Amino acid sequence: MKRVYLTLAMVGMVAVAALVHPVWAAPVGGDVEGQFNLGVSLLHKGKIDDAIATLQKVLKMKPDHANARISLGAAYQQNGLLDQAVKEYWMAIFSQPNNAVARYNLAKVLILKNKPDSAITVFREAIRLNPGYADANVEMGKLFFTRGAVDSAVAAYRRALKAKIDH
């Protein structure tokens, strides 16, 4: 039952989640995961400033919460605060070195910061950690293509297609 609530809350359906289980719908005080879910919900609803404040609260309670760092990085990224986003993604990677999502998000910000070589390196690491990461291959393919490395772009797109077919 809690999984149903968490799924609903993460897609921004907190009101519906409250019907499933009203106690889980209102995170209180030191409830790290409840606050995290609220922060993610606010982020998905576009309430970026509220999401940032909530996720910062989570990180005060649990500084090594990698998913909160990834979500906070995404919120900063949406607000155009790219340096802060980079910092949060690196902190997530420090907390969870095998987190391919943190690396993928970091690479996306590096593209925005006009650092394509660094982005390619980070995408490669995300793919090494998760060979079936189609989105990382697609983004890397785009980078290769814009740089005129058509063969590398085609290879990346093929890996992405294979990953989609295999999964």
Image (tube, helix red, strand yellow):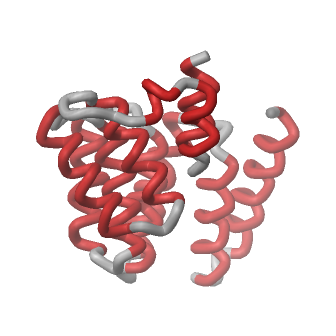
The image quarter containing residue 145 is bottom right
Q: Position of residue 159 (x, y in %)?
A: 74, 48
Q: Quadrant of the N terminus?
A: top right
Residue at image x 19%, y 42%? 59
Residue that extends furthest to the left in the rendered view of this protein: 60
Q: Quadrant of the C terminus?
A: top right
Above or below: residue 96 compared with residue 155: above
Above or below: residue 147 compared with residue 159: below
Q: Position of residue 55 (x, y in %)?
A: 28, 49
Q: Position of residue 120 (x, y in %)?
A: 47, 63
The image quarter containing residue 93 is top left
Q: Position of residue 48 (x, y in %)?
A: 38, 68
Residue at image x 31%, y 68%? 49
Q: Is residue 139 left or right of residue 22?
A: right
Residue that extends furthest to the right in the rendered view of this protein: 165
Q: Is residue 139 left or right of residue 54?
A: right
Residue at image x 70%, y 67%? 153
Residue at image x 32%, y 62%? 50
Above or below: residue 44 compared with residue 116: above
Residue that extends furthest to the top in the rendered view of this protein: 1
Q: Is residue 22 left or right of residue 74?
A: right
Is 71 or 33 nearer to us in this picture? Answer: 33
Count of marks, rendered view: 0
Q: Is residue 104 left or right of residue 71?
A: right
The image quarter containing residue 81 is bottom left
